[in-house]
Image (cartoon, grey):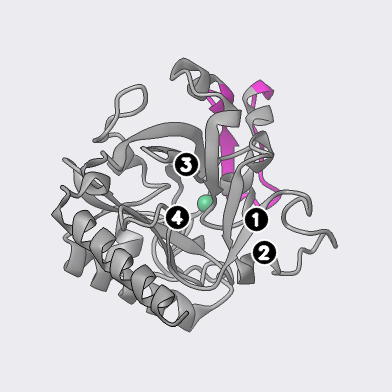
Amino acid sequence: MKKFPLIVAASGIAALGALASQPAQTQSKPGLEKLYILNCGEGVAGDISRWSPGVNEGKSMDFVDNCYLIKHSQGWMIWDTGVADAIAAMPDGQKPADPRATHWKRPKTLASQLDQLGVKPADIKFVAVSHTHPDHAGNVEMFPQAMLLVQKAEYEWPNPLGVGRFKPEHPVTKLEGDKHVFGDGSVTIISTPGHTPGHQSLLVKLPKAGALLLSGDAVHFKSNWDNRGVPAGNSGQDQSRASMQKMADIMAREKATLWINHDKAQRDSLKMSPEFYE
Ligand SMILES: [Zn+2]
């Protein structure tokens, strides 16, 4: 009777030995393959001092709004979903209530850009938004089956409308900090609270293009980053500065390039879908 467990243990060791002598097949899978930048809005910010108090008062600036479509061997992920596709049908776009904020237009729908790539909304495995402002979360429900990856602090942030920030039936993983999306370190959600209570950014390590840090709205445009400007309307001022420092540390460690979601000058220098980065 006592010998039985020993036999099991011995065969277990033999199996491990056999595994160790095999080539590591799981590591030869391609993993992260490519990243597309989608046009998820174009607008004019009425007064950019809104994002950097005391700097450039009354100056307007063209803004863009990006979504990022990521192809991994385990499935598709979309990072941020832009302003609602319905805005594409509004001839004059969507005027903000506060003229200092951003007047958004949508030259192309998100749906049409996915269609152009042959990607169906049902193909999207993960949908993650940097935060729940409408220029980022405008099309989350285009992907009702996709696992939503969002910080618990954002999910539970009380909504002034008195309803949840997401549909309660949407499948969700509520995060409390950083998270490897595919378990291989190629795509990592980085908790960067401050703009909103559960704001997050995304570190993407592409095989050829290298490491990219997608800002979300932890920063709005380059001079805003250079000056560590914190918008007056952010939910946490100290938190915002700490998150920018965390991002700077990650960029130094990973040799990552910062891609600022709303920065038009930067986007004008990048390849847009259907071109891609790999
Ligand atoms: Zn935004």
Please tell me whether residue 6 belongs to the stretch shown in magenta: no
Query: What's the residue type where badge 4 is placed?
Result: Gly
Query: Distance of mark 2 from mark 1, alpha carbons?
Result: 9 Å
- Packing grade of label 1 (10 A; few <14, some 14-19, many >=20) is many
Comparing labels 2 and 3, the label whose residue is closer to the camera: 3
**Is residue 249 at all visible to an observer of this figure?**
yes
User: Looking at the rendering, which quadrant does residue 138 occupy?
Assistant: top right
Q: Looking at the figure, which quarter contains the C terminus? A: top left
> In front here: 36 or 99?
36
Write down the region rendered in magenta: 89-111
Residue drawn at 15 percent across, 47 percent down: 23
Q: In this rendering, is residue 11 above or below 216? A: below
Residue, disc 1: 172
Mark 1 and mark 3 in contact? Answer it, CB < 8 Å: no
As helix, strand or loop, the secondary structure at mark 3 comes to strand
User: Looking at the rendering, which quadrant does residue 219 occupy?
Assistant: bottom left
Question: Which of the two labelled residues, at mark 2 and mark 1, occupies the earlier sequence position?
Answer: 2
Residue, disc 2: 155
- Packing grade of label 2 (10 A; few <14, some 14-19, many >=20) is many
Residue 77, numbered circle:
3
As helix, strand or loop, the secondary structure at mark 1 comes to strand
Query: Distance of mark 2 from mark 3, alpha carbons?
Result: 19 Å
Q: Does the beta carbon at disc 4 come under 8 Å from ligand 1?
A: yes
